[in-house]
Structures are given as C-alpha cells and as structure tokens.
Image (cartoon, rainbow, N blue to C red):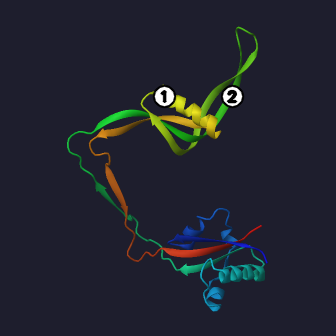
Amino acid sequence: MASVKIETVKGFTKEEAFSQVEGLNVGKIFNATPKWKKVGEPVIGSKEFKLFAAEFLKNKKASEAYVTLKAGSADTRLNPYKVVSVKTEGKRKFKRFYQVTEAELEVKLGKVVDEETGKEKEIVKSVDVISRGSIAGKAEKKSDAESLMKELIAENKISYVIDIIEEVVEGEPIASFGIYTPSTSAVEGMFAIITEQE
C-alpha cells in the first residue's frame, strides 16, 4: 500500500487553506470527509487514519484528498482591521545602519577590453534585486557590512545585498499597530490534506 503524507492547514475558506500546500492540484483533489466520518473519524496522524487515507486514494485512483476537520466561514468585512497609532514623548532619534540581507539577484554581465593588456575582461553591467530573504546582520560602517557580506557569501554560497536603513535609537520605535479584526461570523476552518508519497 502506498505511503501518504498528511498536512494540517487552516483558512477561512478551503481555497485559502489549500493555497498553503505547495504543488497541490486543487482541481483534482477529492473530498474524503464523508467517508472519514463513516469509518468513525479516526484521529489525524494515527495509524488508523493513515490506513484510511491510503485506502481512500487507492479506491479513487487519486493522489490527493482532504478531510474537513472544522468548516470555515469567509471573512466578509471590507476593512477587517483597526489601526492604533502610538504616541512618543519627545523626539525620536535615528541612527543609520548598513543591513546585510539574503537576496536573489539578476546580474547582467558584459565584456570590455583592458587598455593595458589588450585582453577582454568580464564586468558587471547591472544588478537588480529580485527578492530579499532573511536579514543576516548589520553594521554602522559600510566597510564592516561588506566584510560581513563577504564572509557570509563564502560560507553560505548565496548572494546578499546591503541596504541603508535608519533605526530609532531613542524614543518609541513603533509608529502604529495594525490589528486584524475579522467579522464576527468569520470562522477559521481546519483541513487535513492527504497526498500520495512517491
């Protein structure tokens, strides 16, 4: 019997929950909830549930299914938030830092002729940041940030970018809070996603 992978996800709608599972074919996923209830609702992750899940996929000749553990209800509020501004006493003081961050870069290379040697050499014509990842560190001096970046590149074999940032060093660092306030009828659902393992 094929092995199965079981993943529990949450969302106010099935679509919202399913979007969290990478590679899931939403158009071909089967609803195993009625069958699960019929066999006594075995506990998610238990041996009994895994046997049920594998048997369900086999009978349906499917590779994906789901069980609704708790039905969700969509959040219908147009503005489901509250914004709370934070007041600070006195003036905020800022300090500049050089922040080193993981980055996916698009690098365009070119070639020029070295005037001294007459040979072609490769140069970087342009660099664009496609996306940023985790913050790796920061420094007060650009040279220190560049030294850190070189060490990180050598160690992790990935690209980085140095951003100039300002941080509050005196006074309240938070300007506002944004609080998610869904409608009272909104209910976050829970679903068990079953996928066949290769």
Q: How many marks?
A: 2
Write down the residue under mark 1.
Answer: 144
Q: CA distance from mark 1 to mark 2?
A: 27 Å
Q: Is residue 136 above or below residue 81?
A: above
Q: Regarding mark 1 in the picture, which secondary structure is present there?
A: helix
Amino acid type at image mark 1:
Asp
Q: Foreground: 177 or 126?
A: 177
Q: Quadrant of the N terminus?
A: bottom right
Neighbour class for label 2 at 10 Å: few (<14), some, many (≥20)? few
Question: Closer to the camera: disc 1 or disc 2?
Answer: 1
Specify which label sits upstream in the sequence, 1 or 2.
2
Q: Residue at x 60, y 75 (%)?
A: 192
Q: Is residue 149 left or right of residue 140?
A: right
Neighbour class for label 1 at 10 Å: few (<14), some, many (≥20)? few
Q: Regarding mark 2 in the picture, which secondary structure is present there?
A: strand
Q: Foreground: 55 or 22?
A: 55
Q: Residue 136, percent across and down? A: 51, 41
Q: Residue 100, percent across and down? A: 51, 37
Q: Residue at x 64, y 91 (%)?
A: 38
Q: Is residue 158 visible?
A: no
Q: Residue 137, percent across and down? A: 48, 39
Q: Is residue 4 above or below residue 114?
A: below
Q: Quadrant of residue 122?
A: top right
Q: Quadrant of residue 25?
A: bottom right
Q: Is residue 145 above or below residue 60?
A: above
Amino acid type at image mark 2:
Leu
